[in-house]
Amino acid sequence: MTEAQKIIMLQQMGETDSDDVLSAYLELARQKILNRMYPFMEDFEGMEVPDKYTAIQLKIANYMLGKRGAEGQIQHIENGIHRNYGSGDIPNDMLAEIVPYCQAIR
């Protein structure tokens, strides 16, 4: 799926931000997925999310976009405005389907 198709999908999910903003969140989601897939790799330049994880990339981008407001909160305190989310970043259940890549030493 191309970047433009992913942006269209996010727009169909209800996101109304500009294409540049949606593209930035897709990039953040790409980095999260690749970091989970290759935990010991430092540079993901030129690497793309495998097709089987495209739906997860869209979910993560949509989650992060929604988290800017009040979605994903597990606690909200009104006067002092304290917001707590399921995890400090992306919930582990979103990343659980991503299988880390490993290779045997020869």
Image (spheres, rainbow, N blue to C red):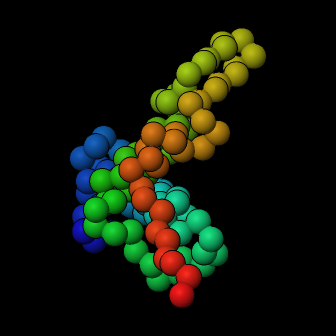
The location of residue 97, given as percent across then percent down, is: 39, 50
* Figure quadrant of the C terminus: bottom right
Q: Is residue 43 left or right of residue 101?
A: right
Taking the spot 52% from the left edge, 60% from the top edge, the residue there is 36
Q: Is residue 41 left or right of residue 12?
A: right
Task: Give the residue furthest to the bottom.
Answer: 106
Determine the image quadrant of residue 50: bottom left
Taking the spot 56% from the left edge, 22% from the top edge, the residue there is 74
Q: Between residues 21 and 77, which one lies in front from this camera angle? A: 77
The location of residue 34, given as percent across then percent down, is: 49, 66
Task: Give the residue furthest to the front.
Answer: 106
* Figure quadrant of the N terminus: bottom left
Q: Between residues 41 and 88, which one lies in front from this camera angle? A: 41
Q: Between residues 70 and 39, which one lies in front from this camera angle? A: 39
Q: Between residues 6 and 33, which one lies in front from this camera angle? A: 33
Taking the spot 66% from the left edge, 14% from the top edge, the residue there is 77
Residue 65 in sight: no
